[in-house]
Each structure stands twice: as C-alpha cells, then as structure tokens.
Amino acid sequence: MICKKYYLSGTSLLPKGRIDRKVVFLSQACITDAVKRRLKIRDFEVLPEVWSSNESLVDVHVYLEKIYWNISLEIGKRLETIHGQNYGAGFWELPIGSWLFYYIQILYDQYNRIECAIKRYGRDNITLLTCNTKITPFDSFPKFPYEYLKDERQVSALYGLIAKELGITVAGFEDCLNPDLNSGGKRNNVFLKTTLSKIVNLTINKCLCLLPSRVIRGEMVLIDQPVFSGFANIGFAIKLKASYFHVCGKIKTQSKSVNRAELLSITAEDGFEKILVSLLPLLMPRIFLEDCFSYIDAAEKYSNYKVYHSRNIMLSSIVFQYAASLGRLKGARIVFQQHGGGYGQLNNVFVECWERRQCDFYITWGWRDTHYPGAKTVPLPQPLHSKVMDTYKQKSEMALFVSNSTSKHVMRFQEYPGMPHMIYKYLDFKKIFISSLDTDVRMHLLYRPHFNQYGWLEKELDLIKKYPEIEINQKGKLIELLKSVKLYICDHQGTSFMEALVVNTPTIIFWDNQYANRKGAERSFDILIQSGILFYDPKEAASKVNLIWDDVKGWWMHKDRQQARKEFINSQCMIDKDCFGKWVDTFKNILNNPGYINREDSLKKR
C-alpha cells in the first residue's frame, strides 16, 4: 500500500512554482480567494476544526488557566536567577502577564492543529510549508499579538518552529503567491465627526497625564488611564491626591547580556509545555531580559504610591506594570476594572481570570461573584454609562445594526463569536436575520462593520451587498448614534448592547446560545428573553423587528420591557447620578482602611 504525502499549511501563503502534492490547510480561515485561484478543489483539503465542540473549549480553558499560573511562576523564578535579584517570583507576574497570556494561547492553538494533522495523516507523510521569515521577540501587548497576527508570514514562521520541535519535516519558501499578506488588525476607514466637546475631552485627558507626578508617602494613587471624561478627572485626582501616569518620551534602554538559556531549565509536564519552554529563549521579549533594568529603573520613581489603578491593564505601559509590582513589594494595593462586555456573564473568560488574579480589587459594572480566585469584586457605576443614561431622543428613522469580528488565527480562546471557526456561523445568523426582514425595514437599515477588518470584511460585505437598499458606513461615534436611531440591533454579547440599554435606545438582540452564561448572570439574560428583547433564533428576532417597526417606541416603552431593562442594568451595567462620589468613597476606603476587602485566601497561599 502506498501512503499519500501531504503538505500542511497554517496560513493562506503558498510558494511559487509547482506544488506536487495535496495541501492540507490547518483551518478553514486559510481558504482565501487567492488560494481558490491557485489551487483546484481536488488539490487541497481542510483539517477538521480542532475546537468545534463546546466541551473542547471548556477543557481548554481549564487547562490553560492551570498551565498559565504554573509557567508564570516558573518563569518568574528563572528571571530572578537570570537577573540575580530577590524580588520574589510573583513580582514578575504582572509585567510578563499580557505577553504570556497571548503567547500561551497562540502557541497552544497551533500546536494542537499540527498534532491533529499528525494523528490524521501520519508524521512521516506530512511536510509543513513555512515562510522563511525570521521571528524576533515582540514587546508586550498590543504589539504581540496584533502586530504578529497582521502578518501571515510571521504566523507561518511560528508554525514552522513548532513543527520542527515536533519532528515534522519543514519546507521553507522565500516568496509566496498571496497578494494579501495581512490577516488581521487592519482598520476600516472610519470618518468620525470631530466635535468641540470631543476635542476638549481629548485635550483635557492628555493634559492630565502631563500633570507633575507627586510621589507622596501616604494617601496617593497612581492612575494609568483617565477614569472619567473631561474635568471630572481633575476633580478625581484632587480628591484622592492622585497622579496620572505619564512617561515623557521613549525609554532609553541600556541592554545587558543575559543567559536566555536559563529559561530552558523549566521542567515541562507534557508535550505542549515542552514546546512552550523550548521557544521561550527565542521569543521572550527583551523588556523582561536584556532591557529589563532600563524599564525597572524608570519605574522606580513611581514605586511609592499606596494604590495603583488601571482601567485596562492589558493596555498599560510596561513601566506602569513594573512600578505597580515594585509598589506591591512595599505594601501597595492594585485595582483593576472591567473594561468590556462578557465579564461577569460568560462562563469562560480567560482575560477576566487573568486580571482578577493580578490585582487586589476588581471594579465591576454591577455584578459580584467568586467565579475566579484573586481580587474581590467591587461593584461600581460605570462612568461613561452613568453620563449617558436615559439620553435617548429619536432623531432618525434608521435601524442601526452593529457587527463584530475576530482575527483569522486564534489570538485567544473565547466564546461565540470570538474564534475564527465561529465566524461562519456568525455570518450565517446575520444572513438569516437580514433576509427575514421586511423590505421596508431593510430600506432603513444602517449596517456598521467592525472597525478592525481581520480579513473577514469582504465576506461580510458580500452578504450585505445582496441588498442594495442597506446603507453601510461607520460615520459617527457609536454612543452618539445610540441616542438618536429608531432601533438598535446587536448580534453579539459585547459592550454596545449594554450601552444601548443604558441610553434607553429601543433594542433587539440575537446570538447563538450554545455557550451558557455563568449562574449569577442567567437571570439577567432570562428577563431580556421573557420581555422579547433577546432572541437565540435570528428568524424570530427579524420577525419581532418586522412586527414592531411601525411603533418601535410604543413597544419599547411598555412597562414590561422597561422593567426588564432596569433589572439588567442594575446587575450588569450599573449607573448612578452620583457615580463620581461612589468612586471617590470606594478609593478612600481602599486607601484608609487596611481591612477593606482583603484578597482571597486561596491566592495568598501561592
């Protein structure tokens, strides 16, 4: 019996010249128009989706949560040895966190796809096609993963590194026949109206970060990103004797030679950990190794604050992260906050797990739970939501339909529609919904694509262009549009539908419900279903829109829907006219009361 030989490819890139065997693409997202033009259907196939079942994703979350904290601690120990320091292994968790968070997930996806190909076709029968692009260490988020995922050559090269570690034959190529090398992260053209208020707010927020940082021992807070808008941020800083973090100019680094090979001494417990550890010396960013002390030295002058607060720690400067870690060694407390939808709702939100483990207090938009260990949750009214509550005043006859998207290669393991293979069902739901709308409704439909293309935009627009009566654009700021459109339509469990409920915009929501919400959030969504706001069937959602179109306002203002809206807001997106006062009081408690909301004992044992 003659065994067939196959090429594997983790991207849409293909070498020039004749391809003498069938190509197996490791995901459906690789099949671009360029691939279809190059290869006949009989010349390629797609590996069955690795993460197609809900059970597999649940198992992944459990596994990754376990491996992340183990590896993080072990890397911290090695960094102590490499740098000859005695900070403690836990010191490094925050600075390396945003990079390691994505590194592990991206690597785990690619590793599993290659392993599945080995099981299906046989190790000796496959050769991985990889682009001969040199991979160099990226800095932390957002350069990794976004800069990495934008370039398919980098994705292809990483597949090659993993394949070599697994003993797979690799065939490199210099040039490719795909004119579109970008697979994600490119922004659509967005034409935002510049208003006086927007200019004022941006100017004020920029100036806040330029205010002199007064390092005071005592009641002092360092804030990395403004919490409120406009002058309220100044008042917040005055009330708390706080400073807004700002580093003038680029950090001048003085690189020191370090022994990267020390990272290889980490003991791997399974095949994936072995790959993960083996690539650390090559891929770990310089900001934790050669350039480490340039950043730590810059962070020293910010290390005497009592409290460090980040609105989104993933977007924080590495200097702020080092400063917070240094401050914690001196007894400081760290406060993070929710910065999007899904938190406190979905069962598996790895980024929420990571954030709550890194801080002492976690500010939520109204919910409180112990779903993840670490910080105790502190419900507070969300400043933006509180500012726009009940500001709806219809000025347009348009129905606004806001879309979502995700990267073409797995960036992190998420629930619907956050994984590449889920996009196909997501687009099918969208197609069913739009085709089920009455023509009169479609004539008033304003479709707003996601601001990041991620390589899916053409498929999305092909669907919409079948109905020329639908307007497609991204003009205007979303929160301002919500205040004036006739109806808001949302097909994903994100942030915008909660903003619409706060504004009191008439709203219809629909999405796939195969991924359950956590128990504490079930009632919040049940009341939206019972009141006819949320649907799990796109046809039913479209039928409701058709039914209410002639009197959307009358339908929305019915006491049942208004009551459901208020109940959801109270538990998932809290608002309060005295939002400012509530925040000030909470931070004063954190500053002045040593016993205020201690961290989970389970985390102290680490």
Image (cartoon, rainbow, N blue to C red):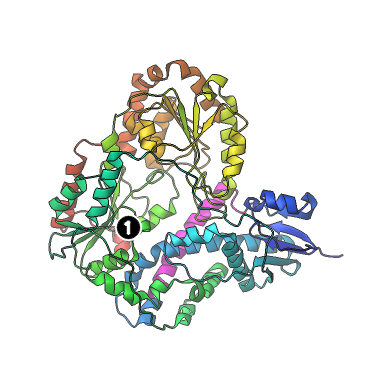
Specify the quadrant of the image occupied by residue 520: top left
Image coordinates for residue 484, horizontal then vertical, percent? 37, 27
Picture residue at 29% right of the left edge, 34% below the top? 388
Image coordinates for residue 184, horizontal then vertical, percent? 54, 53
Q: Does residue 66 belong to the magenta stretch?
A: yes
Residue 574 as seen in the image, left or right of residue 189? left
Image coordinates for residue 561, horizontal then vertical, percent? 37, 24
First to last magenta residue range: 49-77
From this view, report whether residue 564 is shown above or below residue 478: above
> Can residue 318 be seen at all in this image of the molecule?
yes
From this view, report whether residue 182 is shown above or below residue 364: below
User: Residue tagged by mark 1?
Assistant: 374
Residue 228 as seen in the image, left or right of residue 67? left
Q: How crowded is mark 1: few (under 14 residues within 10 Å), some or many (20 or more)?
A: many
Picture residue at 44% right of the left edge, 37% below the top? 475
Quadrant where the N terminus is found in the figure = bottom right
Q: Is the magenta stretch mostly helix, strand or loop?
A: helix
What kind of element bears circle 1? loop
From this view, report whether residue 223 is shown above or below residue 402: below
